[in-house]
Amino acid sequence: MADSLARPHLAHVEAYAPGKPAEELERELGIAHAIKLASNENPLGPSPRAVAAIHAAAGDAHRYADTTAFTLRAKLAALHEVTPGELAFGHGSNELIDLLCRVFAGPSDHAVIGTPSFVCYRLCLRVADVPTTEVPLDRGLFWNVDKLLAAVRPNTKLLFLDNPNNPTSTHLGRSDLSRLLSSLPAHVVPVIDEAYVHFADAADYTSALSLRALSPNLIVLRTFSKAFGLAALRVGYAVGPAALLSYLPRAGVPFNVNGLAQAAALAALDDREHVARGVAQNAHERSRLHAGLSAQGLSVAPSQANFLCVQFGPDARAIHAALLRLGVIVRPIPDLPEHLRISVGLPAENDRLLAALREVRA
Ligand SMILES: Cc1ncc(COP(=O)(O)O)c(C=O)c1O
């Protein structure tokens, strides 16, 4: 019955599968002290200033939030040197991805994404019933601009590219990104998702925000979930042309970024040292983890993010399951079944992962 009531195209859409929470694994196995290296979160947690701001804002929880996010908007507009209208806010960047799909494309349009790339592009495009071409990354790991451009059709409306890319951790360099943006026809809205921008330190990495002049429709996505450590509060934003972004609130729900989240995001922006500490620790631990995994004979993709994409071969799923039994949660990658995605954790967590891997692969 339910199948005939729901819209038919949703029958084949699967709900987003999040990383398993540590408490869930502890309950299932009756163990304590599980560690989660599965959702690319900030292992340092939020800035203490953000926590204080949440406490301070809690007394206003009976009031609806400012749905325009006036103060946060003004602060981010100054930071990115754009007008307030060139920003839009979402309940996490995830909501913005959903809105972009529903606002700019429909069943008679077309979208281009990479495979593997952030799984929500595929999910949201399916929900919006947008025919999509999935362009394989080279060797499963590296963006190929020529293949992306070749997939564009006369009715292509959206192209999603995350840079650095989740789940591969790899990036697209400045010259390739420039070529992509300047080669796309005017009927395409390129969406460059920079969830992991803070962790990218390659000499040829550049934010698409510095390339706005190349692409009149460019929309760049950012989130407070990663370097700012506010994943639970759900704040993301888009930077792009005001005329395009003005459509997002029309299709969305009001009050999508709650008052506590706005207060926390504002305070987090002020605590640059906290972000810098997290970025520095990530860089150090990322290379230590990379070296430790390589020393175990594993092939690790060059990471520009806060996670690693590691090739385990046909045993990847079995290794994932064995790690769970030791209380270590990493992430399988449905589009790369021989790889696992491992978030960079605290030093002790990374040590535990390396030791657990040695044990399960012995
Ligand atoms: C590439 C990419 N974009 C967006 C998101 C979603 O972020 P948010 O928490 O802001 O919805 C993620 C989360 O993992 C991601 O990997």
Image: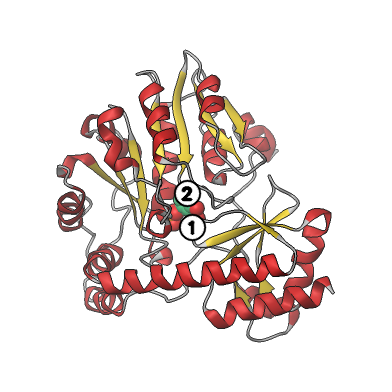
Q: For the view shown, which residue lies furthest in the bottom direction?
A: 32
Residue 70 visible to the viewer: yes
Q: Residue at x 26, y 79 (%)?
A: 52
Which residue is nearer to you in this view: 189 or 352?
A: 352
User: Mark 2 or mark 1, which has the lower sequence index?
Assistant: 2
The kind of residue on which mark 2 rests is Pro
Question: Which quarter of the figure has residue 178?
Answer: top left
Circle 2 sits on which residue?
164
| Crowding near the residue tagged with mark 2, few <14, some 14–19, many ≥20 C-alpha atoms within 10 Å | many
> Quick check: is the Cβ at mark 2 less than 8 Å away from ligand 1?
yes
Under circle 1, the secondary element is: loop
Q: Is residue 225 above or below residue 163?
A: below
Q: Position of residue 123 (x, y in %)?
A: 56, 41
Q: Position of residue 284 (x, y in %)?
A: 48, 71
Q: How many marks are shown on the rendered structure? A: 2
Q: Residue at x 42, y 53 (%)?
A: 195
The kind of residue on which mark 1 rests is Ala
Q: Position of residue 302 (x, y in %)?
A: 57, 54
Circle 1 sits on which residue?
305
Q: Is residue 88 above or below residue 36?
A: above
Q: Residue at x 33, y 69 (%)?
A: 275
